[in-house]
Image: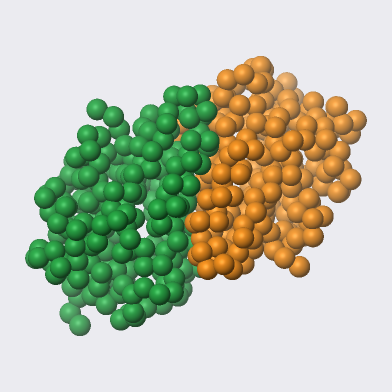
Chain colours: A green, B orange
Amino acid sequence: MRPAVVLFSGGLDSSTCLAIARADGFVPHALVVSYGQRHSCELQAAARVAKALDVPLKQVSLDLRAIGGSALTADIAVPKDAPVGGEIPVTYVPARNTVLLALALGYAEVLGAQDLYLGVNAVDYSGYPDCRPAFVEAFEQLANLATAAAAEGRARYRVHAPLLRLSKAEIIQLGTRLEVPYALTHSCYDPDAEGRACGRCDSCRLRAAGFREAGVADPTLYAPR
Amino acid sequence: MRPAVVLFSGGLDSSTCLAIARADGFVPHALVVSYGQRHSCELQAAARVAKALDVPLKQVSLDLRAIGGSALTADIAVPKDAPVGGEIPVTYVPARNTVLLALALGYAEVLGAQDLYLGVNAVDYSGYPDCRPAFVEAFEQLANLATAAAAEGRARYRVHAPLLRLSKAEIIQLGTRLEVPYALTHSCYDPDAEGRACGRCDSCRLRAAGFREAGVADPTLYAPR
């Protein structure tokens, strides 16, 4: 059984990715990067989901607040009820997926894994440049130059982005078949003190619409409006 | 005056890089990543050198010890008096330069900089795969796909590795002309409690040989043997 590193946030997409990596025949190792997100309940959700799926969870701390430049890592308000799509939103974290994949690559090298899973998708893309297929391919090329394992011919890295071309509804349908515990996952950019979803940020609205379109009951706990 | 982000460790190479970025006409911004190095005096050296060169210093914390896999981030002994060259040494940190460049890219995007400086060179390469020209070129391609600034046509990133093809002696000669305060820099992988260099690790021996070959007095403070 070959190991794979799955970048994991405890959200809907990366939880589905974890289940897909297992269905693909890998032993998934979840890597959660605590990068100064405003919503630490993301980290709690990650621990809950990993436990439910019986997957080892590795946490790395990185203080991206020192760099700032995003509503998720600096004192910039998360937009509510804004149109999805069009301009790159303020929730974009500069070079985030590059940083996350770099850490996943380092972890893969230590584990002896050659496969990285990243739960980006075309809907979440909503303007994020580091969710595009060309980005994923460029990182795969870099990975095969960047590591000792690749340089010595011991590894040929692959970056899997199995959600890339799926709609949110398709992701939820696939994950439901794979028994992803969506009730334990967390997607909201701006939860309340009890960790309940706001229902109004981009992430909440994409998620809610996905459950609606998938014809799957939405298990999300929303804050009263 | 255009800003540039210089990956900085307080060592001989990255200090020279800082001076080169300025000589190239940029306003250098030093980025030091505290990644759980065994030698925290690297961070003290970085602060000393940045102050002496009057360069703003940004520090980002990242706990690479959680990932491990290197003599610099885990409980693996730093080799002494080992032949330089040949196999990839245990001081290799998995995917380190990929992680560092990813953070520099995020910082550059926040600053509005398009130029990254990385002080890798062919001697320090000594088997490190992420010090090769092909790696640097692959990261530059990735950078131009990974960021909002590039996606929106506001930036065209360049990764400068001005030391890539210089010997240690040539680096020291160039840096001496640019008035790099080498006495303030720190290169040793395994300093003593007072921060004095061991004189025996790969890094110390490459540095000492470089001063010798350059015909420049070595200002390094060595621990008594």
Q: List x then y, in percent, for residue B100.
A: 56, 47
Q: Does residue A78 show up?
A: no
State whether residue A63 is above or below residue B123: below
Using residue B9 as the reference point, say whether residue A209 is left or right of it: left
State whether residue B179 is above or below residue B165: below
Using residue B62 as the reference point, say whether residue B175 is left or right of it: right
Residue at 65% across, 50% down = B159
So how many labels did they put on this image? 0
Q: List x then y, in percent, for residue B2.
A: 72, 65
Residue at 55% across, 56% down = B144
When asked about the image quadrant of residue B157, the answer is bottom right
Residue B89 or B62: which is nearer the viewer?
A: B89
Q: List x then y, in percent, for residue A224.
A: 17, 79
Residue at 71% across, 30% down = B123
Residue at 27% across, 63% down = A187
Q: List x then y, in percent, for residue A158.
A: 38, 38
